[in-house]
Image (spheres, helix red, strand yellow):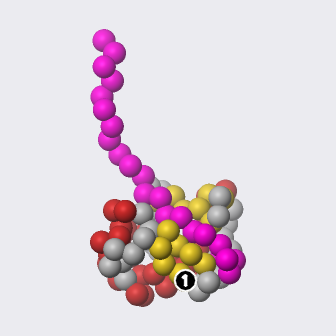
Amino acid sequence: MATVIIPTPLRRFTNNAARLTVEANSVLEMIQCLVKDFPDLKKHLLDANGKVPSFINIFVDDDDIRNLQQEQTVVKENATVSIVPAIAGGAPSTKA
């Protein structure tokens, strides 16, 4: 089973679990397993077309799925999958 690291902002939808184990062959299958167990995650992990939105980064081990086969990227049995939502904001520039 693969280990999925749940980012802090999404843990409220996973009963505060920071890590979950999922049996899946692809990233899309992994997400489908997650949303089956935690339906409120769906709107945060998939867009209306069933794709991972551009503001969500997913890494299988150290590889960004955008550089691989996106949602069809293979998830091996002992893989670690990290979900990394984009963080907006920051301090405005103080340069005059």
Q: Residue at x 47, y 58 (%)?
A: 84
Q: Is residue 87 above or below residue 85?
A: above
In the rendered image, which quarter is residue 64 located in? bottom right
Q: Decide whether residue 95 is among the magenta residues.
A: yes
The picture places residue 15, in percent across and down from the top left corner, at 32, 79
Location of the C terminus (image quadrant): top left
User: Is residue 87 rendered to the left or right of residue 59?
Assistant: left
Q: In terms of depth relative to the viewer, which is nearer, 43 or 22?
A: 22
> Label 1 neighbourhood size at 10 Å, few (<14), some (14-19), many (20+)?
some
- Please name the residue that numbered disc 1 is placed on: 22
Q: Amino acid at mark 1?
A: Val
Q: Decide whether residue 34 is among the magenta residues.
A: no
The segment highlighted magenta reads: 75-96
User: Is residue 62 rendered to the left or right of residue 35?
Assistant: right
The picture places residue 37, in percent across and down from the top left corner, at 40, 87
Q: Is residue 71 visible?
A: no
The picture places residue 82, in percent across and down from the top left corner, at 53, 64
In the rendered image, which quarter is residue 74 located in? bottom right
Q: In terms of depth relative to the viewer, which is nearer, 15 or 37?
A: 15
The picture places residue 20, in percent across and down from the top left corner, at 48, 78
Q: Residue at x 60, y 69 (%)?
A: 80
